[in-house]
Image (cartoon, rainbow, N blue to C red):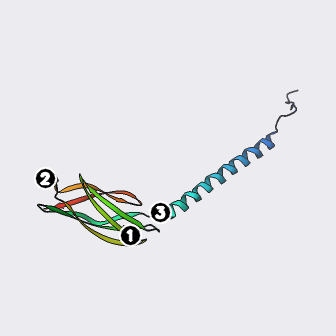
């Protein structure tokens, strides 16, 4: 007698396979719905890119920042500030969906430590983006 006897309350193999299959399908449905939720959030988010080369023109008493940005997202975004080294430049320019705008903003004199290039950040309502600015004296 080599056969196993099922006790009351044991699950047979086909029933166990059906339960596992239903669990896997349910997990797949949860993952797919999560992806759809994320895609709808990402779909409604503005995204800014820097086009061309950002430039800072340094003068003895002031500086001028020139930068062009493009909104590749479906919603408008506002550029609120540009930070270069210890200098901050206040900006309030809205960039609509699929629109490109050039920004020119004056500020304080450039520090002597700035060489030919300096890292900076563009602060927007869509996030903070980094850029490398070329320095002209």
Q: Could you give the CA–CA distance between mark 3 and mark 2, rounded to whole angstroms?
A: 39 Å
Examine the rendering and report whether any part of residue 133 can be seen: yes
Q: Is residue 60 above or below residue 27?
A: below
Q: Secondary structure at mark 1?
A: strand
Mark 1, other Cα within 10 Å: few <14 / some 14–19 / many ≥20: many
Q: Secondary structure at mark 3?
A: loop
Lower sequence index among marks 1 and 3: 3
Q: Is residue 53 above or below residue 30?
A: below
Number of labels in the image equals 3
Examine the rendering and report whether any part of residue 57 can be seen: no
* Numbered circle sitting on residue 109: none
**Which residue is label 2 attached to?**
112
Which residue is drawn at the image coordinates 46% and 68% (left, top)? 75
Which residue is drawn at the image coordinates 59% and 59% (left, top)? 36
**Which residue is label 3 attached to?**
45
User: Image quadrant for the N terminus?
Assistant: top right
* Numbered circle sitting on residue 95: 1
When asked about the image quadrant of residue 4, the answer is top right
Q: Is residue 44 above or below residue 8?
A: below
Viewed as shown, does residue 133 lie left or right of 44?
Answer: left
Viewed as shown, does residue 83 lie left or right of 13?
Answer: left
Q: Name the one closer to the observer, 76 or 135.
A: 76
Residue 47: x and y in percent read 42, 63
Lower sequence index among marks 1 and 2: 1
Q: Tell me whether the residue at label 1 lies in contact with that at label 2, contact meaning CB atoms closer than 8 angstroms.
A: no
Q: Secondary structure at mark 2?
A: loop
User: Image quadrant for the C terminus?
Assistant: bottom left
């Amino acid at each position: 007698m080599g056969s196993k006897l099922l006790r009351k309350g044991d699950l047979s193999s086909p029933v166990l396979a059906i339960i596992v299959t239903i669990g896997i399908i349910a997990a797949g449905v949860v993952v797919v719905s999560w992806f759809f939720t994320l895609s709808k959030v990402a779909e409604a988010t503005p995204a800014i890119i820097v086009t061309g080369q950002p430039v800072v023109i340094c003068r003895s008493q002031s500086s001028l920042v020139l930068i062009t940005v493009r909104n590749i997202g479906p919603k408008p975004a506002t550029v609120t500030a540009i930070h270069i080294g210890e200098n901050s430049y206040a900006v309030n320019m809205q960039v609509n969906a699929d629109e490109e705008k050039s920004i020119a903003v004056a500020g304080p004199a450039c520090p002597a430590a700035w060489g030919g290039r300096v890292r900076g950040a563009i602060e927007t309502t869509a996030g903070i983006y980094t850029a490398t600015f070329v320095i002209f004296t």
